[in-house]
Amino acid sequence: MKCIYCGFADTKVADKRTSEQGDISRRRRECLKCGKRFTTYEKAEKAEIFVIKKDGEKKEFDREKLEKSIKSACGKRPVSETQIVDILDDIEMRLTNRNTNIVSTSELGRLVLTRIKKLDLVAYMRFASVFLDFEDLEDFQQEISKLK
Ligand SMILES: [Zn+2]
């Protein structure tokens, strides 16, 4: 955050108290060069990602929902909470850094699957069976045979 008086690039937050008004937070900052103080209003920018379902329905990417489905696939399996959070962070970062903000459900499913596969095969199969939209049973059986 640049100083509004002298343009110096480094400022510190002078007042740790931030007042949240909706999604805007207000901060007092102090320039490290000239020492002047000013207030900034910061809005957390969250890139919106949309998930397109097979029937064309467009929904906002829901990290919590994805977390729930990963967790249920990993139920009673040796996959830790941290590993699941890592998967979610990794996927979210990947989706945010692309030049499109749209992802299809099957693409999203595959992003999860390639990561779960490295952790636990049973969780992988569970997730595959509920999340991936296998065209028909044959596809699913092919996936299983690839694992053997
Ligand atoms: Zn300054």
Image: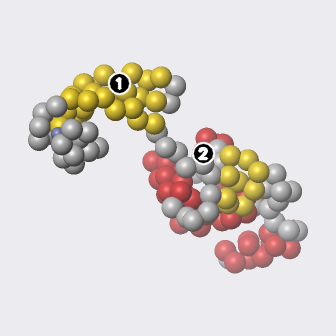
Looking at the rendered image, the disc whose residue lies closer to the viewer, 1 or 2, is 1
Say which quadrant the C terminus sits in. bottom right
Say which quadrant the N terminus sits in. top left
Q: Residues within 10 Å of mark 2 (few under 14, many from 20)?
A: few
Callout 1 amino acid? Thr
Of residues 58 and 107, the one nearer the viewer is 58
Question: Which residue is depicted at the point 80% across and 62% down?
Answer: 133
Task: Give how far apart the Cα atoms at labels 1 and 2 are.
Answer: 26 Å
Q: How is the image coloured?
A: secondary structure
Q: Which mark is residue 63?
A: 2
Counting the numbered discs, the total is 2
Q: Residues within 10 Å of mark 1 (few under 14, many from 20)?
A: few
The residue lying furthest to the front in this view is: 5
Image height check: is 125 above or below 45? below
- Which quarter is ligand 1 in? top left
Question: Which residue is depicted at the point 74% across and 73% down?
Answer: 143
Q: Secondary structure at mark 1?
A: strand
Some atom of ligand 1 lies within 8 Å of the CB belonging to the residue at label 2: no
Q: Residue 2: x percent and y percent?
A: 26, 44
Q: Which mark is residue 18?
A: 1
Q: Residue 61: x percent and y percent?
A: 65, 48
Residue 20 position by quadrant: top left
Q: Secondary structure at mark 2?
A: helix
Q: Is residue 73 visible?
A: no
Of residues 17 and 8, the one nearer the viewer is 8
Q: Earlier in the sequence, mark 1 or mark 2?
A: 1
Question: Which residue is depicted at the point 16% across and 31% down?
Answer: 36
Question: Which residue is depicted at the point 82% across and 51% down?
Answer: 57
Callout 2 amino acid? Arg
Would you say 7 lies left or right of 40 here?
left
